Amino acid sequence: HAELFPPLQVKLALKLCSNECDQGHLFSDWDSTSRGDDEKKKKMMHQLELLDKNYQPGGLCEYIKNAKKLLKHAKEGQNPFDGWHPSVPKGENVEYGSKKHRELEKIGLKQAKKTAFVLVAGGLGERLGYKGIKVRLPVERATMETYLGLYVKSILAIQETDEVVRTSGQKIDVPLAIMTSEDTHAMTVDLLESNDYFGAKKTQITLMKQEKVPCLVDNDAHLALNDEDKYVLQTKPHGHGDVHSLLHQSGLLKKWKQMGVKWVTFFQDTNSLVFRVIPGALGVSKSRDFEFNSLCVPRKAKEAVGGIAQLTHTDGRKMTINVEYNQLDPLLRASSSDGSGDVNDPATGFSPYPGNINQLIVKLEPYEKQLSKTGGAIDEFVNPKYKDSSKTAFKSPTRLECMMQDYPKSLTGTKASVGFTVFDNWVGYSPVKNSPEDGKKKFDDGQPTHTATSGEFEFYNCASRILRLAGANVPEPEIDSKQKFNGMSFPTGSKVVLSPSFGCSFERVESKIDNLSLTAKSVLIVEGDVSFENVQIDGAFEVKAEKGSKIVLKNLSVKNKSWEWRSKANAKEEITRLCGFEIKKKETSSLLYSEKNKTLVVDGDLSQLELKTH
Ligand code: UGB
């Protein structure tokens, strides 16, 4: 069939049919098929060429070689941690709002402006059961801000702090790269475009699309063809670890280095709290000169977050690394004297291993150097589901995967300093990963639910607690066990939304509060440069100072009927179904000010506020 294809494709086909690659089965029917299939054959060669190009370094033959090795290890039951002994590593524990935290934030905010941000958003989030991309989900429904909107606005808020000046003396735009996939790319572009890039410049945001990898049918790493179409290869996502090779291949790392960027901060698609802890964690990276810093929270045993462990090899090598949640229990069982696995420490009620929330801060210069050597390749793993204990056949095709947090494995044996920073859950980690049904099972099991419902309430509760730490009088949230959302109850109280432009560090928020109190039924939504002096709120209050303008609120007592979060089961509308509630807005007091370079002082005069009855 050589005459049908360009020479490079013929070369690739011959390589795939070589003894080493052993993929002759892909073409075994070709002689007996009619000429009518030529177009399909061309498409298949095109797909193979793309798969070859996308798996870097090494192409498809390297993929097959790696797969054979990993499948052999899996069949033999080889433990990837053979020879490694786990122990609890030492890291930096930071109490939000403490003196140490304030100092770290001061250092970190300076670094934040020399940081490039990378959002991995190629996953579809099947566990959540949401049709769209996860970054389109609203973080909360008081304002309907999306995850992507919140992230971009947080980056812009960092950019706005003081002057953002580089060595060239020019103001620079803090860069954001987003890794998408075939599943999420078009919808991500659409979300950005239809929201005018959430106020960022188009050139500030770079999209990098990750490609899928071919599936494997057996232990000999034969590639899988589609059941319905023998000219199409089955493919699946390769995992978030692709982000490193994409950053390398795209040339972004070099570009950022030239711009004066010092740090790269990675984060995931749904964690509304991530930017609350980034300034402090950057402060830790800078002051301890960490080349790699994983953000962590205290982890409940068996929770679906990886655990950071120090692994020491029998030959003396050491590494501080994430052990993924499905591997932690067997590793701990194998190495403990009493066979206990992933269990809580009775003294604290948490696993002794800090939970990796996959917010990673790397130092750009050594990272860029290291990737130039490795091409960004990350240790892979395979997780085949076998038909039976003979481990000879799979239930369905599998594929190799890789994870972004495994980057430090490539640093083992070097002098690189790898560390981690722990913040409390309430301020650092609130992902939305599970459907209401799976969340309910976790709820019954006493585990965090990581649902759209918990995500929304945790967001409000975090802001309320920050206000409390800043001296405001906001009641602690309480659980009303009679009020269930999708069968689950959560701590709830005042619903507070502090937008990134109100303050991107604790000190900035604190500087805006001088005697503020809220009742439990209150809703407070603040955006922009707003300060509170002797303000009492018992109702719903939205206040917004547009960019460049300022509002000072003094001696005010805002009172109205407020809003209510009402439980609603089996709603037709998708988001309502995921959250299990709808918001009944009764009355809202609101204030918007947009005069540039001016300050509006509202001193005891309620008539300046608009009262909306919905
Ligand atoms: N993602 C991609 O961009 N591409 C892919 O191919 C796959 C995913 P999940 P999981 O912090 O909560 C991770 O599926 O299994 C993106 C860590 O491995 O949410 O819950 C995807 O869009 C674990 O150690 O990951 O586990 C999303 O943004 C723990 O830290 C991100 O990758 C856990 O997250 C994560 O994808 C956690």
Image: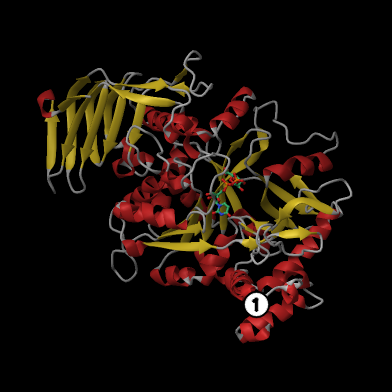
How many marks do you count on the picture?
Answer: 1
Residue under the point 44% across and 62% down: 207
Considering every residue shown, the one lying at the far right of the view is: 390
Image quarter hosting the C terminus: top left
Q: Is residue 360 visible?
A: yes
Quadrant assignment for the N terminus = bottom right
- Name the residue rendered at 65%, 25% in the picture: 445
Whole-percent x, y for residue 463 in the image: 39, 32
The one of 443 and 193 positioned closer to us in this rendering:
193
Snapshot colouring: secondary structure
Left/right of residue 242 with respect to residue 135 in the rendered view = right
Instruction: Look at the numbered disc 1 and give the secondary structure of its residue.
Output: helix
Residue 572: image location, x then y, percent? 43, 30
Q: Is residue 527 above or below residue 12?
A: above
Q: Which kind of residue does numbered mark 1 sit on? A: Arg
Residue 339: percent from the left, percent from the top? 84, 35
Q: Nearer the viewer, residue 338 or 445?
A: 445
Give me the residue at 53% from left, 48% from top: 124
Left or right: residue 27 compared with residue 425? right
Q: Specify whether 472 is left or right of 69.
A: left
In this view, 363 is above or below 567:
below
Q: Which residue bears the numbered disc 1?
A: 35
Residue 315 appears in the picture as rendered: no
Please determine whether, in this image, residue 122 is positioned above or below residue 582.
below
Quadrant of res 607: top left
Query: Badge 1 local density, few (<14 within 10 Å), some, or many (20+)?
Result: few
Residue that extends furthest to the top in the rendered view of this protein:
482
